[in-house]
Image (tube, rainbow, N blue to C red):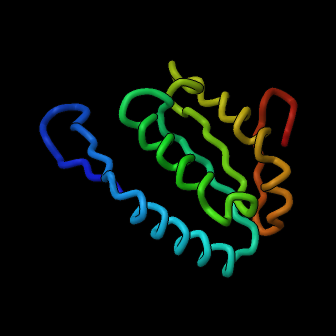
């Protein structure tokens, strides 16, 4: 669990709760319900790999690693801001390529990405 109170500064401070059992319990309930509903679960983390967002991402990895569902979930951390800096959204193709097998396995989702003459 984390909080971030709204302020007038660009990046308000983020406080991550030190109650690891609460993190773990909430995560496991959520993942269990997703797996029961969808069977296959893929997670894409788009937060930065620096600053407070990195701390959130690291906490998420810690909770996933300590979960009995860790082998049932495909997890990808794609630092969107670093990868797409300077309006280079075409770099999202890297993300799509890295999860393409999972996208196809899901069956209900189709992803098309044009990169020059290549369509994924």
Compared with residue 20, is residue 92 higher up or lower down, i.e. above or below? above
- Pick the residue in front: 54 or 37: 54
**Residue 61: image x %, image y %?**
56, 47
Question: Which residue is rendered at x = 51% and y = 65% of the image?
Answer: 27
Q: Quadrant of the C terminus?
A: top right
Compared with residue 87, is residue 110 higher up or lower down, i.e. above or below? below
Q: Residue furthest top?
A: 86
Total marks shown come to 0
Location of residue 21 by image quarter: bottom left
- Pick the residue in front: 32 or 62: 62
Task: Please indicate whether residue 3 sits to the left or right of residue 80 in the image.
Answer: left
**Residue 100: image x %, image y %?**
81, 47
Location of residue 109 by image quarter: bottom right
- Pick the residue in front: 45 or 59: 59
**Residue 99: image x %, image y %?**
76, 46
Task: Please indicate whether residue 68 sits to the left or right of residue 30 in the image.
Answer: right
Question: Which residue is rendered at x = 62% and y = 52% of the image?
Answer: 65
Q: Quadrant of the N terminus?
A: bottom left
Location of residue 73 by image quarter: bottom right
**Residue 14: image x %, image y %?**
27, 42
Question: Which residue is rendered at x = 74% and y = 42% of the image?
Answer: 96
Question: Which residue is rendered at x = 59% and y = 26% of the image?
Answer: 83
Task: Please indicate whether residue 99 sits to the left or right of residue 51 in the image.
Answer: right
């Amino acid at each position: 669990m984390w909080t971030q109170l709204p302020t007038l500064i660009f990046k308000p401070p983020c406080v991550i709760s030190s109650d690891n059992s609460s993190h773990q319990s909430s995560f496991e309930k959520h993942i269990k319900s997703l797996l029961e509903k969808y069977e296959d679960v893929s997670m894409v983390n788009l937060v930065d790999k620096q600053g407070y967002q990195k701390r959130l991402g690291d906490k998420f990895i810690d909770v996933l690693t300590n979960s009995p569902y860790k082998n049932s979930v495909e997890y990808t951390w794609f630092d969107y801001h670093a990868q797409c800096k300077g309006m280079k959204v075409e770099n999202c193709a890297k993300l799509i390529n890295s999860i393409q097998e999972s996208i196809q396995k899901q069956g209900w989702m189709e992803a098309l990405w044009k990169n020059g003459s290549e369509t994924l």
